[in-house]
Image (tube, rainbow, N blue to C red):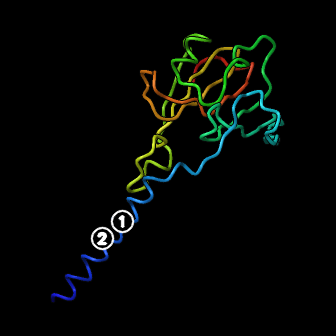
Amino acid sequence: MNRLLIALLATGALFAAGCTSNQSRPAAQSSTSSSADTSAKTTTTSDGRPHRYVKSRDGSFEGEIWGTPAKNSKFTSLQIGMSQAEVEDKIGRPSDMKSYVTGKAWIPFYFGNDGHRFETFYKGQGSLIYTGGGIGGGRGQLVGINHDASEDGYQ
């Protein structure tokens, strides 16, 4: 009985050590500095729009940009990695927004900020996707820019 108890305790200690070591690792994402980064590889979506992965402005993760900016688009001044507050200071408040849970929300012991995302909609511009933060704004980081001049501004 004592051997079984010792084996269970040792297994639990190894499991806890493994979880602790994963927390100190940086996110397994890469990134680019601006939406104008030309080094990013461009592919095409199923509807024929360009799609590319770009690094955040601080280089800590990778974001995505879909489509081509409309003429005089407010989105051209944005960079992956900006906070929601910075974006709204630059281009104004969105017409509408929605939030959703990502698959990472169901990973046990996941303590990152990508358990949920929220998307904001701008009429005639497209939509922006943030990770972390909250619906009220301020702390989310821009991870996706969807250029779409036909956007009606509502989800």
31 relative to 107 in the view: left or right: right
Query: Residue 37: horizontal and vertical position, in percent?
Result: 78, 31
Instruction: Give the amino acid type for the residue marked by disc 1 in the picture.
Output: Ala
Which disc is residue 124 wearing? none
Query: Residue 34: horizontal and vertical position, in percent?
Result: 71, 28
Q: Secondary structure at mark 1?
A: helix
Q: Which residue is mark 2?
A: 13
Q: Nearer the viewer, residue 56 or 51?
A: 56
Residue at x-position 65% and y-position 41%: 62
Separation (CA) of disc 1 from disc 2: 6 Å
Query: Residue 121: horizontal and vertical position, in percent?
Result: 60, 21
- For residue 43, above or below residue 67: below
Tags 1 and 2 touching, CB below 8 Å: yes
Which disc is residue 17 wearing? 1
Q: Secondary structure at mark 2?
A: helix
Neighbourhood count class around disc 2 (C-alpha, 10 Å): few under 14, some 14–19, many 20 upward:
few
